[in-house]
Image (spheres, grey):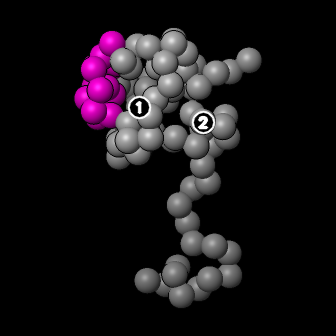
Amino acid sequence: MSTYGKRLLQERLRLHLTQKQLAAAGGVGRHAQSLYERDMSLPRAPYLAAITLVGVDVLYILTGRHAAPHSPPPGNRLLSER
């Protein structure tokens, strides 16, 4: 069974980041990052919001489902023509 900690670790490795780098991006220390990845502590919303800025798929971490790619909805020509 996949846990949020394992998914967070997968995302960090996918982005080729160290614990220290992802922790800094999230505004926490490396120890907190380690606790998150080992399912010993739950990350808070400000951390999750901040790590999206480095490309982490937070929806995947929380639910196990990947976020849809950012593209205009089908049939919406106005958005795709800009």
Q: Which residue is mark 1?
A: 15
| 52 to 6, vertically: above or below | below
Query: Which of the 4 image quarters holds residue 12?
Result: top left
Question: Which residue type does callout 2 highlight?
Answer: Leu
Left or right: 22 with respect to 3?
A: left
Whether residue 68 is in magenta: the answer is no
Q: Which portion, as a residue range, is magenta?
A: 18-31
Question: Which residue type does callout 1 highlight?
Answer: Leu
Left or right: 21 with respect to 39?
A: left
In primary-sequence order, the first of circles 1 and 2 is: 1
Residue found farthest to the bottom: 78
Asked if one can make out residue 37 in the rendered structure from this viewpoint, the answer is no
- List x then y, in percent, for residue 6: 57, 19
- List x then y, in percent, for residue 13: 45, 23
- List x then y, in percent, for residue 77: 59, 85
- List x then y, in percent, for residue 8: 51, 26
Query: Which of the 4 image quarters holds residue 75?
Result: bottom right
Q: Which residue is mark 2?
A: 62
Residue at x 67%, y 34% (from the top left corner): 64
Circles 1, 2 touching at the beta carbon (< 8 Å): no
Asked if one can make out residue 81 in the rendered structure from this viewpoint, the answer is yes
Disc 1 versus disc 2: nearer the observer: 2
Query: Which of the 4 image quarters holds residue 19?
Result: top left
Which secondary structure is most common in the magenta stretch? helix
- The quarter of the image holding the N terminus is top right
